[in-house]
Image: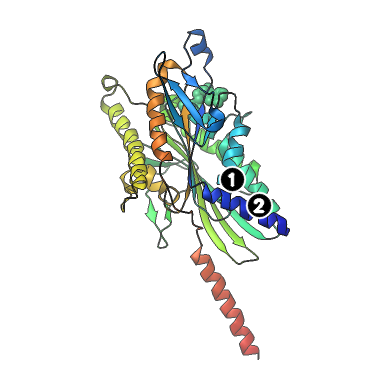
Amino acid sequence: KFSKEQAMRKKLHNQIEEAKGNIRVFCRCRPLSKVEASNGHATVVDFSAAKDGDIGILTGSSTKKTFKFDRVYTPKDDQVDVFADASPMVTSVLDGYNVCIFAYGQTGTGKTFTMEGTDKNRGVNYRTLEQLFKIVEERKETSTYSIFVSVLEVYNEQIRDLLATAPTTKRLEIRQASEGFHHVPGLVEAKVENTKEVWDVLQVGNNARAVGSNNVNEHSSRSHCMLCIMVRANNLITGECTKSKLWLVDLAGSERLARTEVQGERLKEAQNINRSLSALGDVISALATKSSHIPYRNSKLTHLLQDSLGGDSKTLMFVQISPSEQDSGETLSSLNFASRVRGVELGPAKKQVDTAELQKLKQMLDKAKQELRTKD
Ligand code: ADP
Ligand code: MG
């Protein structure tokens, strides 16, 4: 049970979170790899003011370009440090908020490391679900929750269900339900009740990702890997019902491809990756200028994320960078994009009330009243 003090503290915490705005950008730099180190690559990243959220990129022997973010992680910061900062945002999905967390950056900068992590060093995806179950357990006296997950991939502007048990030829499309909720009919939504089940589901998704591609690394750098966590919550004390979702997205590599390299099928692929990423950029720009039309429908990626990106939702972007001077061009371009994202101001996030569920409860209540009346 909640004590008064706990409730007060929670309220204060929420107010602080609210005041900070609903778009955050965290910058994470990977360590210099062994190969880079042995080839004598220099580091161009200056972390001296990382604690204040400042990061510098040396663009010449005496020139430096600096950027400000909500957090800057040095290569020494680990998965626990990163998740500690992301966790208030992810857990707000239990309170009925739509949330989107995505990792952006050039291939090889640690997007998958941050989101998925490794067996021994798990990332945001697994830690998120672990945390959600912990809170569900803590709140079991006052609220009930159901949690479902979908794992999908967007490749060449096509949605692939990574949890589907049998391959289907039917194309998966995005539909909008009457209350405005976007969903993909036919996509597997696995109900998960504990962390063991989560791990199994994530493994299935992971294994499916490699199937049918002859170069796994190349495939994963050109596709967007997306985990969707849907939460139905019912507060037993206030009667509030919410239906919300959290997207966790490992984006395709943001690097620009050399023109001469790409032809034929590869060219189509490259254009499609760029279509999704540039559509993401366009959505961000439209949000930044408070445009009346936000072009979510220009790509599968942005269309899928529509409910959780901008508007009433909370967004967290990880901009992943390499420390090497060889990558400084891509690093600057990623940081410029991330700065634009950080400049977007969103209004307060809004709870996603589950009207269908409320309707059902109201009908039950009316029926009960009716029964009481007929007894009189
Ligand atoms: P991306 O998904 O952006 O292509 P990866 O996540 O595959 O990049 O990372 C590339 C390599 O760098 C991997 O071997 C990964 O384990 C390593 N790596 C990335 N970030 C870190 C980090 N913060 N600490 C240690 N190793 C990292
Ligand atoms: Mg990756």
**Disc 2 secondary structure class:** helix
Kindly report the distance in space between the C-alpha atoms of the residues bearing marks 2 and 1.
14 Å
Check if mark 2's residue and mark 1's residue have beta carbons within 8 Å: no
Please give the residue where the numbered disc 2 appears in the rendered image: 136
Q: Position of residue 9 (x, y in %)?
A: 67, 53
Looking at the image, tell me whether mark 2 or mark 1 is earlier in sequence order: 1
**Disc 1 secondary structure class:** helix
For the rendered model, the colour scheme is rainbow
Residue 170 appears in the picture as rendered: no
Image position of 326 with respect to 275: above or below: above
Q: Position of residue 126 (x, y in %)?
A: 59, 38
Image position of 131 with respect to 331: above or below: below
Is residue 304 rendered to the left or right of residue 148? left
Question: Which residue lies at the image location 40% right of the left edge and 49% below the top edge?
Answer: 306
Residue density around tag 1, few if under 14, some if 14–19, many if 20 or more, within 10 Å: few
Displayed quadrant of residue 299: top left
Residue density around tag 2, few if under 14, some if 14–19, many if 20 or more, within 10 Å: some
Please give the residue where the numbered disc 1 appears in the rendered image: 88
Image position of 89 with respect to 331: above or below: below
Is residue 197 rendered to the left or right of residue 36? right
Q: Which mark is residue 241?
A: none
Residue 192 appears in the picture as rendered: yes
Instruction: Report the amino acid beneath label 1.
Output: Pro
Image position of 306 with respect to 117: above or below: below
Instruction: Report the amino acid beneath label 2.
Output: Val
Q: Quadrant of the C terminus?
A: bottom right
Question: Which residue lies at the image location 32% right of the left edge and 48% below the top edge?
Answer: 295
Q: Nearer the viewer, residue 172 or 340?
A: 340
Question: Which residue lies at the image location 42% right of the left edge and 62% below the top edge?
Answer: 179
Q: Nearer the viewer, residue 46 or 83?
A: 46
